Image (cartoon, helix red, strand yellow):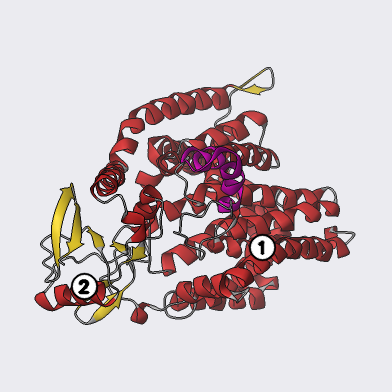
Amino acid sequence: MAGKNIGYYDLVRPPFIPFLTSLIFRFEGLSIWPIMLIDGFIFIFGSIGLFLLLRFRFDNLTSFLGTLLFSTFPIVLTFICSGLTDISSVSITIWAFFFTVLAVKNNSKWFYLSFPLAMISFVTRFASALIIFPVLFYILINLRCIKRKKDILIGMLFSFVILLPVFWFFYVSFGDPFYTFSSFFGTSSRSISELTGMLFFYNPDLLYFVKNMPSFIGPQAIGVVLVIFLGFLVYILKSIFNKNKKSMEKPHNNSFKLLLLKNKLKILFLALSVATLIVSLQGVHYLFSEILLFVSLFLLYNLFNAFKFKDLDLDFFIVSWFMCFLIFHSVYVIKDFRYFIYLAPPLTYILMMGFKWTTSFLGIKIKNRSLTHCLFSGFLVILLILSTYTSLPSMGETNKDLKQLNEDSISISNWLVNYDPNYQTKIIYSDIWPYSGWHLKMNINKMPQFYNNMVIDVGFKNYNLTAQDMMKYNDKLVSDHADYYISRKTGLTLINYKPIKQYGSLTLYQRIV
């Protein structure tokens, strides 16, 4: 994209962040810092957007606390400025949702921004395509409030304009404008039977993200959960010891019973929808489960809407956001803990809802200011500071192996440059082709992985190779006339290649003449 091709490329990646990085490459040359700068800037942009989104529901202090909470989640801190697309995609999604709410509540012309931003989020990371479900859900439950419905279609048309240069780029690169999209959606729709436990990120556990949530959100968020739990505990105790409990709850109970009687059919459909959703998880294509989720949420919203709760539509919008990505990443059997980043903003909103309710319920007011809210807010800020400070060393530990791998790749690449000044005219294969391609500034061939007569492209976690597997590697290198091979495999013996240098986990093999 920058016109500085080194031979290595991976065009199946979403194009937006590479495009932005290429703009800096054009002026500053090839280096690592541009993508870190772009990722960091978009994160700050997203944090501001989250504050504004929270302001639709909460006061300034609560919204600020929520933004701090999101920004200091350990899972978020670990990947800020990493060059991956998760943080950037989520940050852009936040703004797409902010303008969607603004379009519904204030002026429908904001759809001209919300849909294009949603599309930019999609071309930042393809899994963000799922945001169309909560967006359409929010529009549907507020359809009567939108006076100029044609602005929705205009906004959609604007968003598709963004795809035109992307289609053109893929057409020039692959001869197929839909190649990259079809490749992603084909991969994401694989069922469990089509994958094996040999893949490194293979994990069919539906509750993976739920079980690991405490480590993803950190002590500060757990502190918020404890505050919410305290509020519910006090509420229950007050209800038990309240002498006027029966007289106070009677109208509410009557209205609730009346609601049940009037909506028996809706409740029946809701129960069937939820039951089918639970049964469908991992049993059918995830899109079917997503549709069932939004049918269930729509029925549930219509039931609760009878009580005229304030901001109910916004609450359901955020819950749909959370559940949409939770279902997708839980059902999708390839799991990485960084995927939890997509759940972080809506989870923040839900936590701050509970926090605000608790501090209001336990509120002690002085001059119309909630003393309880200020005290708990101060407690949360202290917890945020301490948690962030103590988690900084662990972030270095989390990325220690990747850092070491990068250093070993630099060392072995520099050694090869000095060993063979004509290395760029040679055919080189590598297990870590992106690293090797960047450091050697040339096209590096991707080495597939062989195991029990199977060819596995990426993510293989079993390196206990048999003699037959080793022969497959040797034959692959010989048939492609490879001169060098950079390998991460221990105990690898090749008939036609000999190891000439080793750094850490990497070994450089050279063809025996």
Residue 29 at what x, y percent from top left?
A: 53, 41
Count numbered badges in the picture.
Answer: 2
Q: In the rendered structure, does residue 124 fall within the stretch colored magenta?
A: no
The answer to whether residue 104 of the structure is visible from this angle is no
Question: What residue is pinned by disc 1?
Answer: 301
Residue that label 2 marks:
473
Which residue is at 11% across, 74% downward?
466
* Closer to us: 33 or 207: 33
Q: What residue type is labelled 1?
A: Tyr
Q: Could you say which quadrant of the image residue 282 lies in?
A: bottom left
**Which numbered circle lies on residue 91?**
none
The residues tagged by marks 1 and 2 sit, at their Cα atoms, a distance apart of: 57 Å
Q: Does the magenta stretch include residue 18?
A: yes
In the rendering, at what x and y percent does residue 381 appear?
48, 26
The boundaries of the magenta stretch are: 17-38
Image quarter hosting the C terminus: bottom left
Name the residue at 42% across, 69% down.
332
Which comes sooner in the sequence, label 1 or label 2? Answer: 1
